Image: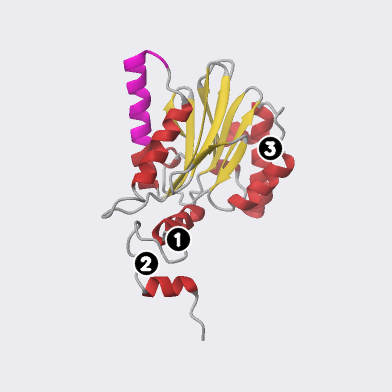
Amino acid sequence: MDIPTEMQHQAMGYDRAATMFSPDGHLLQVEYAEKTVRLGSSSIGLVCKDGIVIIADRRVRDKLISPESANKIFEIDEHIVASASGILSDIRMLIDQAQLMAQQNRVTYDSPVEPVSIMRLIADKKQMFTQYGGVRPFAAAFILGGVVRGKASLYTSDVTGNFFSYKANAIGENDEKIKEILRRDYREEMNVEEGIKFALKIFKEILEKNFDIQRFDVGYVSVKDGKLVRLHGDELKKHVK
């Protein structure tokens, strides 16, 4: 009986360190972290003609948890918003460092930090934890957007530390299904309000009977004022058909 390749690699110890390549060129610990990310709750990010919007599924089912403590929209600075999927404690560490960099930039240069600089900081930290022994990869994927000098931008980074600029993207559970819908139906001429309705429509299609408006957080930054606005729960009802 043939043994699956992944089981062979496990038996030979290729998954015992994030720095050890398997014979076919895989970092197995990194791939395990990517699987963890895909078990996390979903987020959708969109670049709209008048701003940037991120919609996150907080996926909290326990009524005993205070909803505010399970927020999935993170403010990096007043003009930058982010969401993430994976292990929340890993995410928190990276968000803290990103917020610190944003404030240091304001103090040092008296100007708002570029969203790509924050994304590069997060990506570099994640890459570092795939290259050195004694650590494990961050099980976290990020979607980050912001507005600087009237220009909206969106970035996504994966577990390995790669990152790219996107017009629209998704991370977390069902990300491939969501991306297929985005590739088919996303329009660059959408405004922020239309973008929120579009993303919630996607979640409604994906989640079906499990869709509940109370489980979503929305954060957007408009080109006009460049400041983060949050929406949650009943505030989103008008955006759902």
Looking at this view, is 145 or 161 the one in front? 161
Q: Vertical placement of 115 versus 174: above or below?
A: above
Question: What type is the residue that disc 1 sits on?
Answer: His
Mark 3 or mark 2, earlier in chain: 2
Using residue 124 as the reference point, say whether residue 82 is left or right of it: right
Measuring from the top left, give residue 146's x and y in whole percent.
52, 26
Residue 138 appears in the figure: yes
Kindly identify which residue carries mark 3.
Answer: 198
Measuring from the top left, give residue 105's x and y in whole percent.
36, 20
Q: Residues within 10 Å of mark 1 (few under 14, many from 20)?
A: some
Q: CA distance from mark 3 to mark 1?
A: 37 Å
Kindly identify which residue carries mark 2.
Answer: 14
Question: What type is the residue that disc 2 sits on?
Answer: Tyr
Q: Secondary structure at mark 3?
A: helix
Q: CA distance from mark 2 to mark 1?
A: 9 Å
Q: Quadrant of the C terminus?
A: top right
Q: Magenta residues, as a range?
A: 95-111
Q: Which mark is residue 26?
A: 1
Tags 2 and 1 in contact by the CB under 8 Å rule?
yes
Q: Secondary structure at mark 2?
A: loop
Q: Secondary structure at mark 1?
A: loop
